[in-house]
Image (cartoon, rainbow, N blue to C red):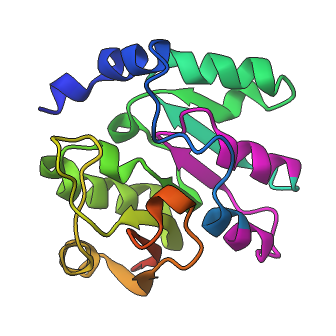
Amino acid sequence: MRNSLNSIYWTERYLQHDTGWDAGSITLPIKQYLDQLKDKSVKILVPGAGNGHEAAYAFHNGFENVHILDFSPVPLDNFIKEYPNFPKEQIHLEDFFLHHLKYDLVLEQTFFCSLNPSMRKNYVKKMKDILFPKGKLVGLLFDTYFNKQGPPFGGTKDEYHSLFKSDFTIGIMDPCFNSIPPRQGRELFIKLINNP
């Protein structure tokens, strides 16, 4: 299944404008989280960044060390055209699981749910590897299952808690109160701290 959700699959989705996960701008939970961060020097990654709304917002609000990663060239090319001043060396056309830089903060926005659930343990291991000790994984996870075959793939708080608890301190894993309307009541906001 992982191979079927490869860069070709996602590139086709972008070319067909079949991008229902794209909210069109940064979502409010992540915006409000970034707005309360005082240290603008933190090194941030947005994996599976797509059109990069979170990275664009962060960069234009003083977070100069923000990186985006996707393994489809289409959204990254769009991002470069839209934001020509964004540093090219901070744009990664790459498989997340092969990425080797380290970060203080990873923003999770519909990347986790795009992966087949069989990849979730690998996701946790990779997040632990690319985050500095006490680095944070912050963002949103679906707190629901879907009636059709994914992606997106859903889950529950209990599942996620079991998945992350050995490698991360669960700072926050609570129902999200400021989701975008189509996702109201179906998301968890997470702040997970990488255990040293």
| Image coordinates for residue 157, horizontal then vertical, percent | 27, 78
Q: Residue at x 45, y 61 (%)?
A: 183
| Above or below: residue 142 compared with residue 74 | below
Direction from residue 68 to residue 193 in the image, left or right: left
Image quadrant in which you'd find residue 146: bottom left
Q: Residue at x 54, y 33 (%)?
A: 50
Image quadrant in which you'd find residue 163: bottom left
Q: Quadrant of the N terminus?
A: top left
| Above or below: residue 129 compared with residue 119 | below
| Image coordinates for residue 81, horizontal then vertical, percent | 77, 17
Q: Is residue 36 magenta?
A: yes
Q: Quadrant of the C terminus?
A: bottom left
Q: Magenta segment range?
A: 32-60
Direction from residue 68 to residue 58 in the image, left or right: right
Q: Residue at x 23, y 72 (%)?
A: 156
| Image coordinates for residue 123, horizontal then vertical, percent | 29, 53
Q: Residue at x 77, y 49 (%)?
A: 57
| Above or below: residue 117 compared with residue 166 | above
